[in-house]
Image (cartoon, rainbow, N blue to C red):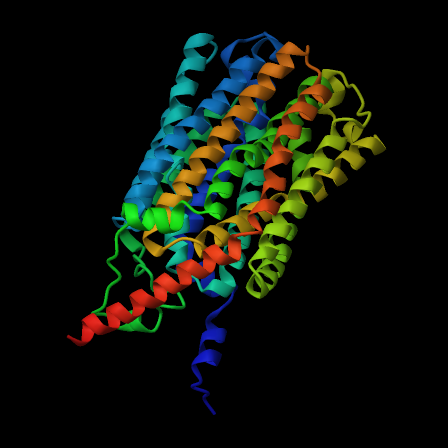
Amino acid sequence: MKNNHPAIQEKTKVGFFRIIKDLWPNFMLYISYAFTISALFINLVILVNIMWPGEALELHASELGLLGGSASYAMAFSGILFGILADKFSRVKLMAISELIFGMGLLINGFVPQGQGLLTFGLFFVLNLIRGFSAGGFTPLINSYSYDSTEEQERSQFFGILQALFQLFQIVGMFLSAILFQNYLWRQFYWGTGAATILFGIIIIIRANEPKRGSKSKELKAILTDENIKYEYKLNWSTIKATILKPTNIIALLEGIFTSILIAVPDFLLIAYLQSDHGISALATSIIMIGFGLPGGVLGSLVFAKLSDKLGTRNLRNRLYIIVGSAVFIYLMFLTYFFIPLPYLSVTEGLNIGIVFSFPIVWLAGILIFFGRGVLGLWNINQPPILQAINLPEAQGTITSTNQFLETIGHGSGTILAGALLVVFGGNYQITASITMGLGIIGGLMWLLAAIWVQKDANRISEILKQRGMELNQNNKK
């Protein structure tokens, strides 16, 4: 017997495969970004040889920090542009444009001349800026699109799947790029990923559907099922003052500067620490990341996503407490990593996988990476649903891009600061990690302050949407 109760019907629609089916353009964007994001960091030593043959990594740590950090700045500024556009125009078209630009930046990178010092560095730098500019649109577009495509009780599951796939493809891309770069087939890496990304952009523009704005808000869902009724409210100074300039949003914006340092620094320092300071090859490093980081990242994202939705639905404050707990845990795990006595290997020993893994302390380092990666995604899983709950449908792109602007400034600054401190302290990773990650933990703790106002800010949005639902219903009857 078929049950037509709406609550039961709604419940059956929630799940992994429906999320994949309805939000596949978002996954395409994030997968292409994840697959290429670590190609520079995992191949730091080889990259120096590509640009400045025969010169040591220590001599160019600041340039490499600038290479990664400057792309974050481009991402920060472009995110503001894409965020404003996302609240006014088709998210699908904007996704396709940003993906195509990203793919072109990858494809052209494969034609950069090798071994020309500053010329090679300069071309890598410019193309990395182009990719940073296009990637700046990914997060605000995904946040705006997902807000109108997912139910409130499944948003952490969406971001959990997104984060799990991100970590999966990040580490697979890390491994593949390490193999190709180590054999000086780096051009093929850029050509292949560039062509695939351009194809993704073409598929998105041809096949993706634009979700109806505001259609998944519980206060508007019933009225917006009518195809003749559209949510056409626009962000203005009055709604900005009434919603965006409220305590939780302001804290979320400020904490992003610090928290992103906590998240960015381990990727840069951890890999450089293994390769430059201890002689472990890029291939061996990628195996460590695959063997320990990949299971931790994927399992952590999927397991904690459902738990986050369950606790977050019960009380929005729970999402804040989860973020704080994860920040403290990440800080302790990765800081410990830089103080364990890893072996110092020769170039030949570092290339030998058997020798690398014969040291028990390397396995301990892997376990720390496993647990660190396991909770690393909790911030990305819980922060977007918080921002979605305390902002109007027409502000989703704007608030996300503003938040991303400050986060990427923090991310880029953290990478540049880490590179500069390595030079200042003569390659001392312990001091560098302590200073940079010490700054990062400030952001995680700021969420405790937000717990005072978050529910009040969410209730304010709910009341506005209820009023607008009545307005739309009355206007439709006229």
Image height of 261 relative to 378, above or below: above
Specify the quadrant of the image occupied by residue 9.
Answer: bottom left
At x 33%, y 45%, the residue is 95
**Residue 400, position in %: x, y?**
41, 44
Residue 224 or residue 146, whichever sits in front: 224
> Horizontal placement of 192 versus 284: left or right?
left
Q: Residue at x 63, y 55 (%)?
A: 304
Which quarter of the figure has residue 265? top right
Q: Residue furthest bottom?
A: 1
What is the x, y in percent for residue 308? 60, 58
Which residue is situated farthest in the left direction here?
478
Q: Is residue 184 left or right of residue 131?
A: right
Examine the rendering and report whether any part of residue 298 can be seen.
Answer: no
Q: Which of the pair 11/332 is nearer the observer?
A: 332
Whether residue 268 is visible, yes or no, is yes
At x 52%, y 14%, the residue is 63
Residue 477, placed above or below residue 52: below
Query: What residue sits 41% from the left and 68% below the top?
Result: 218
Q: Is residue 247 left or right of residue 99?
A: right
Residue 60 coordinates in the image, percent (x, y): 56, 11
**Which quadrant of the figure contains the C terminus?**
bottom left
Q: Nearer the viewer, residue 149 or 52?
A: 149
